[in-house]
Image (spheres, rainbow, N blue to C red):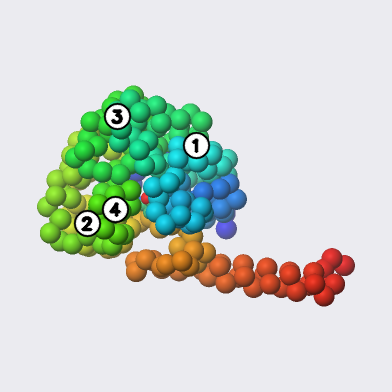
Amino acid sequence: MSVTVKPVRIPDFLEKKRRGERIAVLTAYDATMARLIDRAGVDAILVGDSLGMVVMGHETTLEVTMDVMVHHTRSVANGTRHAAVIADMPFLSYQTSVADAVRNAGRLLGEGHAAAVKLEGGRAMVETVARLVDVGIPVMGHIGMTPQSVHRLGGHQKLGMSEAERLLEEAKLLERAGVFSIVLEQIPSEAAAAITKAVRVPTIGIGAGPDCDGQVLVSYDALGLFDEFVPPFVKHYAKLGEEVVRAAAEYAAEVRDGRFPK
Ligand code: KIV
């Protein structure tokens, strides 16, 4: 499939919402996957700290470090020509102080070649977001089920409507602080629709219903590569995991019985 190679810039996100164009985002963690996903024409590639789970095999995202994120972000940027590359700020790389946040976000842009960073949290992150934006670092917000708070939330499950008012307030605060978009993760569709209507910046949903301005999925989920658990909102667009097992078994059989190499 061939697509135009005009790069997606951060201001294009606002423009897309203004024009009513939906935004498609997938995660990637290495250059080869990024190259394939970029060729498909997605608008943005998120180097998510979900890599702690789907690439590194941890149970949460909490063990991901700045060095790991810089390494994977640079790999993804090496494979990307069209999509905007957005890098997740890992646990404790931005919550400790505004100065830490600026230094670490700067590494993701400078060393990792990301165009923007994403960080989790609403009200508590307003000062940090404002400072990052002030010094020229675009920020994507992330509210709802925020995986770095997995222990406070008691798991990775969806939030209820009782949180809707707070989430709306936090989305407005993030917009005022200068985010260029906001991920809404695992919140009721009605709450996501209300936020999407109330803010000018695009909302990017994951498990947040159809009324967001865009959607994001973890590529390993969407492509059927990660089968430790499948979140209820995931759609499998391919079953690559099964194909990898089939191909590797065929290779092993051919090596063992002498059919490969010829
Ligand atoms: O880490 C990640 O991949 C994410 C997305 C699921 C939004 O934060």
Task: Say whether disc 3 or disc 1 marks the residue closer to the N-terminus.
Answer: 1
Camera-side mark, 2 or 4:
4
Label 2 near ligand 1 (CB < 8 Å): no
Residue 111 in picture, x, y percent from top left: 51, 31
- Distance in Å between CA atoms under marks 3 and 4: 21 Å
Q: How many marks?
A: 4
Q: Which residue is depicted at the point 35% across and 56% down?
A: 215
- Left or right for 140, reference 228: left
Badge 3 amino acid: Ser
Cα separation between marks 2 and 3: 29 Å
Q: Which residue has dot 2 on it?
A: 192
Disc number lying in front (2 or 3): 3
Q: Residue at x 68, y 72 (%)?
A: 249
166 and 199: which is toward the camera: 166
Which residue corresponds to mark 3?
97
Dot 2, how many residues are within 10 Å of its Cα: few (below 14), some (14-19), or many (20+)? many
| Callout 2 amino acid | Ala
Compare marks 2 and 4 and give the one earlier in the sequence: 4
SS of the residue at dot 2?
helix
- Which residue type carries mark 4? His
Q: Which residue is mark 1?
A: 67
Q: Secondary structure at mark 4?
A: helix
Instruction: Identify the amino acid type marked 1.
Output: Asp
Image mark for residue 151? 4
Q: How far across and down, in percent of the image, does residue 105 sit? A: 40, 32
- Residue 260 vs 149, above or below: the answer is below
- SS class, disc 3: loop
N-term mark: 1 or 2? 1
Task: Answer whether residue 142 is visible to the viewer in this image.
Answer: yes
Q: Is residue 232 left or right of residue 158?
A: right
Marks 3/4 in contact by CB < 8 Å: the verdict is no
